[in-house]
Amino acid sequence: MVWMVGAHAAPGLIATDGFAGRQVRLWLEGPPGITAIVLASTAGFSPCSPQLGTECIGLLGSPELWATTTLDPGGHAQLDLPIPPGLSGTQITAQVLFVDGSSHILPPPVQIQVRPGNMDPDRDFLPTPLELSLGLDPNNADTDGGGVPDGDELALHGTNPLDPADDLVPILDSDGDGIPDDQEILFGSDPFNYDTDGDGLPDGDEVNNWGTHPLIADTDGGGVPDGDEIFNGTNPHDPADDGLSWVDSDGDGLPDAEEALYGTDPFNPDTDGGGVLDGDEIFNGTNPLDPADDGLSWVDSDGDGLPDAEEALYGTDPFNPDTDGGGVLDGDEIFNGTNPLDPADDGLS
């Protein structure tokens, strides 16, 4: 079945002018969850009326450009349609075809004027001549400094790009990823897809928490997606650790990813050969790279309030509660800020 144009709520698209060698940005609105196919041609458009059992695409000639996407649960999508360099100065007719499996919706087409690729230096999707004619700054994406790009003010909000006061439109975060739609459009991420690059991390988390790139699934290029690295405990900015994970290859109680942090060998349970597993050394507070302290632990052999492992750090005797013999326990001296190796200060506190 083919739905006649106008028989349903008017879905369609908004498009700014395109730029040769770059792209034209399309904002799609239609029935939620269905496929949208955008077809574009430089040959023009001939109006036609869809009828039951037929499919009418009004584009003349074969579509030279096309792209496809799926509308989100809210019935929205953003699509960037690449434009070859050779089309500078031409006009493109674009029509969106919504397909839900058995039915099609064909809203009216839009006309897109293709400008030279260097005519939008501030990348707000408004060509320089238009910005100048409107009194906008072609080198400033947000002329009025109100926080919303000039192109968004004109195409999406219908606000005045010369008045910062009306930029305070409701802050929309359609995909719930923690980044407002306006910022996503400016940055190039998809305001209707909470994870634009599909790496398992919401765009907002990538920008605000991890510092990873919301448009690049593997920020460090190490071969593991950013989301997997966060889950594995590896560094999404360091390609060297991409092969590590929470797996504990040597069974020493220390995950391979953490062994990389401590400089221990993930395939040797006792890196320093001192007789104590690397994981136990980290738990005990001893050095897994130094075999000399492997016999120490959080045990307090002399009962002075200072664990044996810490006695090693202070140079005190783990089997003598008052190493300097001054009358104050080693643990109390550390607590009091006195020197457990100097009996002269034991009366101070």
Image: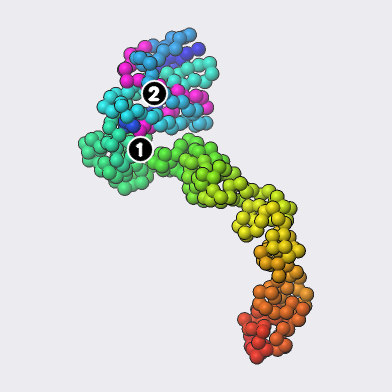
Q: Tell me if residue 26 is in the magenta stretch.
A: yes
| Left or right, residue 60 beside residue 301 | left
Residue, disc 2 = 65
Figure quadrant of residue 338: bottom right
Give the position of the C terminus as an image quadrant.
Answer: bottom right
Residue 260 point in image, percent of width and height: 62, 55
Query: Measuring 42% from the left and 31% from the top, which residue is drawn there?
Result: 79
Query: Measuring 62% from the left and 48% from the top, which residue is drawn there?
Result: 244
Amino acid carrying label 1: it is Asp
First reached walking from the N terminus: tag 1 or tag 2: 2
Magenta span of residues: 22-48
Q: Tell me if residue 164 is in the magenta stretch.
A: no
Residue, disc 1 = 152
Query: Measuring 23% from the left and 35% from the top, which residue is drawn there?
Result: 129
| Left or right, residue 148 beside residue 339 | left
Residue 36 point in image, percent of width and height: 46, 24
Residue 315 point in image, percent of width and height: 67, 78
Characterize the local packing of mark 1: few (<14), some (14-19) or many (20 or more) Cα atoms within 10 angstroms: many
Amino acid carrying label 2: it is Leu
Figure quadrant of residue 183: top left
